[in-house]
Amino acid sequence: MVWKLFRPLLLCTLGVCVGLLANVRAMAAPETARATIVRAILTTDDAQKRAIINSLIGQGDEAIREVFTAWRQDNLYVYSAPGGAKVPVELTGDKDAAGTQAAVRVDTGEPLKDAAGQPLRLVAKQLTAVEHDAGLRRAMKNVVDLLDLGSPLPAKRLRAVQTIGFAQKADKLPALEARAGLETDTEIKKELKEAIALIHLADSDDGVKIKALAELQELHNSSSYDLINALKVKAETGGKPAVVAAANAALVAIENHRSVVKFFGTLFRGLSAGSVLLVVALGLAITFGLMGVINMAHGEMITVGAYATYITQNVFGEGMHFTLPFIKVAIHLPGLHLTGWAYQLYFVAAIPVGFLSAALVGIALERSVIRFLYRRPLESLLATFGVSLILQQLFKLTFGSNNVNVDSPVYLSSNWTVFDVTFDWNRVFVIGFAAVIVFGVWLALTKTPLGLLIRCVMQNRMMASCMGVRTERVNMLTFGLGSGLAGLAGVFVTQLGTVGPSMGQEYIVDSFMTVVVGGVGSIFGTVVSALGIGLADQSLQQILLNPVLGKILVLLAIILFLQWRPTGLFAARSRSLD
């Protein structure tokens, strides 16, 4: 009896709960972009169609672009299902003999299927075409223009914000303001503020312009400089002193920010250029500074390291073919066919390969030519210059006269941006690794038995020989060390430009200048000289806006400095010099 009385109440309560649960699920699952478009297609009122389409503004679903393109190209139709339901579809592909095409549901992007689950092919003439007019096309274009604002890719969103801001179209302002409330990326939020302020610059109200200029003054982004300057000129012509004053304040803030960014950017580029020069000159500081050998083929040791990097990259990839000169023997180096991060590690492997390759070539040069010319600087200069020409020709015959590219690994091909100062990863790597190399050379020369032997032989070769030191072996290893360091420089240089047979000649003069200015025989002097020359070169290029004139002034400054201090910054003293 009790059950009969409460049964209707329980059933009613259960029905209400099921209904509430369905509503909660519907609220938890927001309508997809495709479902919204279907709703717009099936709506008969044109104004309502436009309103529904405009509701998609700011969404980043790429399906919107695809469906709207099909709509504008008259490829959308309404299919009446057997049950009476209206299903918008897109007809795709070529027509068959019966005139049918494959049908894709607009709401899901999946093929339209019959009751048996088989894909349907439909005839366009038997369906109701989805019409569009100029108003709908404008609404769709507006949505597509703002589509990237909601893209999951930050780079796309950033590019879209910048494009919209510089266009200064007031009708895009609501979309930017809506996106500003949703954006989480710090950089894009800053760009959104700038874009909104730039659009406000085109407002007819001077108060709005002044407020926007204050916002741009706070942001001090260089990209807005031209638009602010154009507004300033227009305000001066129109006699609006308040707008002119606000524009001037914003321009001054941008110029001050530019000066700070330029200073630190020049400092970084100078350090990176000096680090490259340091790695190049460090090997010369050993062969010329310690051994007293004027090696004009030092640049070709750099080229050996660069080509060793190129070969290593190809071995990690698909392999390579080349022909040995004179004997005309074709060589095929098989590739490891690596992909992903395994392939990207080629540069790590190229570092020891470049060092050892250049060291072996240097040892061969010392054993075949240099060892007969110690204490004969003029003869060593002429002989190594001839070796330099021979090696350049060998490179041309082996790898061709054209430059070749070495791809930057992904971990060195991007950059950091800190307060608008860009730090390229490859240059940061060169700076850090140059410091490691300098420290390693210092340890090798001062804390190892080989370093002790090198120093004693270089200071007094005759006395060291009398003490039982095998001076010829020490000479060979020292020259190999200096050449290997040049090979390391060649590995790094591949990240800054192309590799060619004559690339080493670009660095040989700068290397000798660095060693001489720092003090012949002084590793510390080479470090100071390289960084100083790099900073001076980059600073003068920025000031004069002429790289050639900047280098000329650096050369003149070095000549004048050597006139005043011929021994360089830090003159090395030894028993042989006393």
Image (cartoon, rainbow, N blue to C red):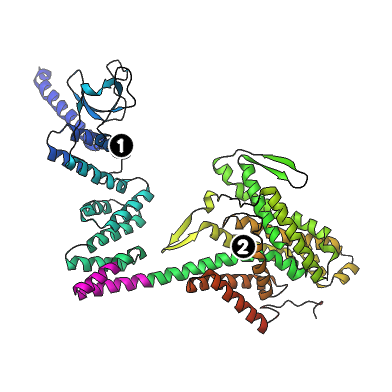
| Quarter of the rendering containing residue 101 | top left
Q: Amino acid at mark 2?
A: Ala
Residue 181, how many percent across, how many down? 26, 53
Q: Is residue 356 visible?
A: no
Q: Position of residue 472 (x, y in %)?
A: 85, 62
Q: Main secondary structure of the magenta part?
A: helix
Number of other residues with Cα within 10 Å of mark 1, as a class: few under 14, some 14 to 19, many 20 or more: few
Identified at 63% across, 81% down, the residue is 560
Question: What residue does disc 1 label?
Answer: 66
Q: For the image shown, how many numbered marks are present on the structure?
A: 2
* Apparent side of residue 453 relative to residue 183 in the rendered image (left or right): right
Residue 55 is left or right of residue 528, and the answer is left
At x 65%, y 57%, the residue is: 490
Q: Viewer-nearest of labels 1 and 2?
A: 1
Q: From the image, which quarter does the N terminus lie in?
A: top left
Task: Using the image, determine if residue 371 lies above or below residue 113.
Answer: below
What amino acid type is highlighted by mark number 1? Glu
Give the image location of residue 566, x and y in percent: 70, 81
Residue 434, numbered label: 2
Quadrant of the drawing holding the C terminus: bottom right
Mark 1 in CB contact with mark 2 (< 8 angstroms): no
- What distance separates the C-alpha of mark 1 from that of mark 2? 51 Å
- Span of residues in magenta: 228-255
Question: Of 163 and 114, which appears nearest the observer?
Answer: 163
Mark closer to the chain start, 1 or 2: 1
Residue in the picture at 60% in, 60% down? 433
